[in-house]
Image (tube, rainbow, N blue to C red):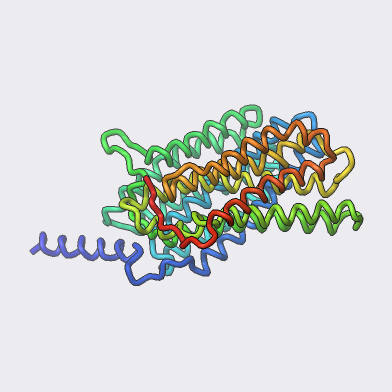
Amino acid sequence: MNSATAATGRVRVDERGAALLRGGITSPRATFLELFFDLAFVFALTRVSQRMIDNVSVRREDVLRDSAETAVLFLALWMVWSLTAWVTSRYEPERTAIQVVVAASMFASMVMAVAMPRAFAERAVAFAAGYVAVQVGRPLFLTLALRGHPRRSVTVRVLIWSAIGAVPWLLGALVPAAQRVLWVIALAWDYAGLALGWPLPGRGSARAAGWAVTGEHLAERYQQFFLIALGETILVIGVTFSGGPFSSDQALAFTVSFIITALLWRIYFHRAGHVLAEAIRAARSPGVLGESASWTHLAIVAGVLLTGVGYQLVIAHPYGQSPLGWMVFVMGGPAVFLAARARFEYEIFGRVSRSRLAGVALLLASAPVAMLLPPVGGLTLSGLVLAGIAVGDAARARGRPLEQPASPL
């Protein structure tokens, strides 16, 4: 009788844990809660861009160091966003417990964002506390909420890795002399855990590639973050132009910047971007493609943000002396985007995008020429390369039906 009662209790516990998982009835579309969560990252990405702009235009003597610091902060934000996207793709976002997780992650992200401008100074504790709170608190909450469900083993291993990683994050915030080294170590630890599946001795790993996910939902979340990044560049264009002299020079740089943003949108969504959801849904192992697409979108978003910094620098100084390193953003940002977009093409169709790789080569090869031009000339040259790719895409697609995904992953 006691054993039967215990078995019944275990079944009820499992059922309560299973109720948190996404079911077949749930819509695969992103929920309003997730879109609300993304609002924090609209603000966060503006802080990333502004920090990079300040690195180049204000603190010229330590550009490389400051840029590396900004990269660390951006990667920490991406870790928070991407793991939250995986959580809402695996678990039922309409459940109160998951809504608590998302809302708490949003608040922690806002704390990180407001601390970002001085995260390597007096706001280090705030940034580290926000990051650690969400990275440790999320798996802890899910572990307790899942109770005896088998999927609890994944949240436990994530919790252990996050707790270990929290030590150098907090120590770095408290010991300024060792902050940079400790935070790089902490970030490397967190990304290693994600890439390797948070392995534990005697228990192996649980890579995200093996998870059961909702393909359409995960694809939509990546695309939404890409659009957030594009929106951030639109904000940079508008704020910079409206806050400066309303001259024809600035108007030209403003127009070219907007056209480039539209071209980035077009190049991303052409063919592969349209069928990402179908590709993940049809894949033999959706988690494999989903994990790969996560790394690809990290690079795509980074390229867009770098390009946005270039907009600000050129609109502010279209024909004048632009800050040192402006070419890295004007040519390098689109080059990073195209390289990642070429990988995206392979993930979806299993082919090498020669036009995008040629675009990367052209951007890098034309950088010395662009240095001889005024900043707006370099920006226009970058736009011509992207326009050539977009026109080539349209010409090849004319009269042809939308391709079906054939992912080698």
Say above or below: 373 vs 265. Answer: above
337 or 84: nearer the viewer: 337
In screen coordinates, is 362 left or right of 171?
A: right
Q: Kindly tell me whether residue 157 is visible in this rendering.
A: yes
- What percent of the width, then of the height, locates residue 106? 56, 58
Say above or below: 371 vs 271. Answer: above
Q: Kindly tell me whether residue 105 is visible in this rendering.
A: no
68 or 276: nearer the viewer: 276
- What percent of the width, then of the height, locates residue 336? 61, 41
Image quadrant holding the C terminus, namely top left
- What percent of the width, then of the height, locates residue 126? 63, 46
Q: In the image, what residue occupies the spot 48% across and 42% down?
A: 352
In screen coordinates, is 156 left or right of 336?
A: left
Say above or below: 387 vs 4. Answer: above
152 or 25: nearer the viewer: 25
Q: In the image, what residue occupies the spot 65% across and 27% down?
A: 177
In screen coordinates, is 66 left or right of 246?
A: left
Give the residue at the far front of this rendering.
399
The quarter of the picture where residue 141 lies is bottom left
The quarter of the picture where residue 3 lies is bottom left
Image quadrant holding the N terminus, namely bottom left
Q: In the image, what residue occupies the spot 49% across and 51% down?
A: 82
Q: How many numbered circles does the render carry?
A: 0
